[in-house]
Amino acid sequence: MSARVAGVALAVCVALAGVSLLGQERPMQLDDTKVPKGRPAPRLANGKPDLSGYWKGTTQTKPGGNIGKDLPGWKLPLTPAGEAALKHNLTATVDPEAVCIIGGTPRHNASGLPFEVLQGNNKIVFMYWYSYFRLIPFTPGLKHSDDPDPSFFGEEIGRWEGDTLVIDSIGFKEEKVWIDENANPHSDAMHVVERWTRPDYNHIHVETLIEDAKFYTKPFTYSRTWALGEPDEQIQEYSCSENNVDAAHLGFGPGPIRADGTRGYDNPAPLPPPVPKK
Amino acid sequence: MKSHLALAAAITLAAGGHVAAHHSFAAEFDATKAIRVTGTLVKVEWTNPHTYFYVDVKDDKGEVVRWACESGAPGALSRRGFKRSLLKLGDTLIVDGYRAKNGANLMDARRVTLPDGQVMVGASAGDGGPQ
């Protein structure tokens, strides 16, 4: 693209969007076709890949927010109990995240928001927007409890298999949880296995296996790749319950789901025409 | 120029896509009810999870009706140049957006025109609302 074309494109973008360029909003997700590949992943002194970084989703992840992304027609294999739970979520619950409840696993992996990872020799922490975090130990020999306390991220145990960090989680809550942004359900019987890798310097990847015999007839998978943000980017302060005026105005469920599998209206009414320039 | 426009439109669309607000636009607002509210700014709440500003509007009978205008989180607005300091009490604002599904005098402030003509995007990033 020539500089002139790029300049015209930018100017028209601004005009179309009607946006002031007083400040440049950094994108929360990246076009992966423009992210360099091939530089090796960094390693810690112990030889393990370092997964640390500020990770952004890519525009290639479609449909965003939908845990059924990798299934034909995004159709989740719900049991009758799962169908009932989905109906309940759609007709009797507001989005738990909207009332400041932790999204949990695996919902945060389907979120469009960036996240940050800091890795040590025996633990790794995933930090999310909304001021949530999960701290996963991977000391050799760890085993799940016989009766773990239910939680939103579950009881998480890490282990290394070569250059792959495997996080095995059980012990989830069943109430006030959506497995994704579209209000799909999970039960307290869910078992999640995440396999995290850093295929190159600029990318982190997860392969996720989700088993939940109460709500799903068979296990299913969810995979995703994120791209590295800029070195000076990081999670910012976010106090979810500071002034949650909207909570009283929310309807049940996520509202309409578009034909492309994302939440929202397919044919919104246009806004009034922009105010003519003075 | 036509190709330049097409390119620009493509870039604009590519810049959108899924992010994730703390709730879906469609859970709170009706995308079939686009409205314009013109009124006097009387209150600003520069808070999480959303910024709110309130404008007093005279209705057809001359009575003042207060509208709550919901926008993105302060950090998101600030990063796109929509700073708290741009909202001055007493200013007349033109707010374009969508009305709450429950009929309250609450709107999603997707486009805000300031008195000097500056146009700010107030939408919550990635809420699935109209782009």
Image (spheres, rainbow, N blue to C red):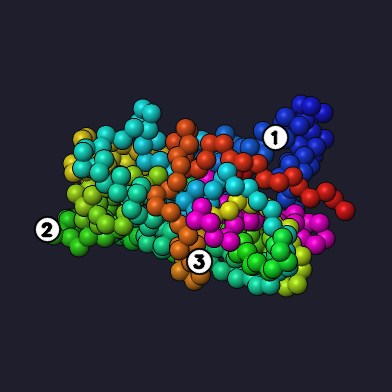
In the rendered image, which quarter contains the C terminus of chain B?
top right
Q: Is residue A106 at all visible to an observer of this figure?
A: no
Q: Is residue A215 left or right of residue A41?
A: left
Which chain letter matches label 1?
B
Query: What kind of residue is marked 1?
Result: Ala
Q: Assess whether residue B125 is covered by the magenta stretch.
A: yes
Tell me the residue at 73%/66% (across/down): B62
Q: Is residue A268 left or right of residue A263?
A: right
Tag shown at residue A245: 3
Q: Residue A18 at x, y = what percent?
A: 74, 48
For label 3, count other residues whose C-alpha is less than 10 Å away and answer few (under 14), some (14-19) or many (20+).
some
Tell me the residue at 50%/43% (across/down): A264
Q: Are marks 2 and 3 on the same chain?
A: yes
Which chain letter matches label 2?
A
In the rendered image, which quarter contains the N terminus of chain B?
top right
Mark 2 residue element: loop
- Label 2 close to label 1 by CB (< 8 Å): no
Tag shown at residue A146: 2
Q: Residue B44 at x, y = what percent?
A: 64, 71
Segment colored magenta: B101-129
Q: Is residue A136 left or right of residue B32?
A: left
Mark 1 residue element: helix
Q: Residue A89 at x, y = what percent?
A: 33, 49
Q: Is residue A13 at all visible to an observer of this figure?
A: yes
Nearer the observer, A261 or B28 = B28
Which chain letter matches label 3?
A
Q: Are marks 3 and 1 on the same chain?
A: no
Dominant SS type (magenta): loop
Label 1: which residue? Answer: B9
Against A21, residue B41 (above or below) is below
Q: Residue furthest front?
A: B61
Mark 2–mark 3 distance (CA, rounded to whole Å): 41 Å
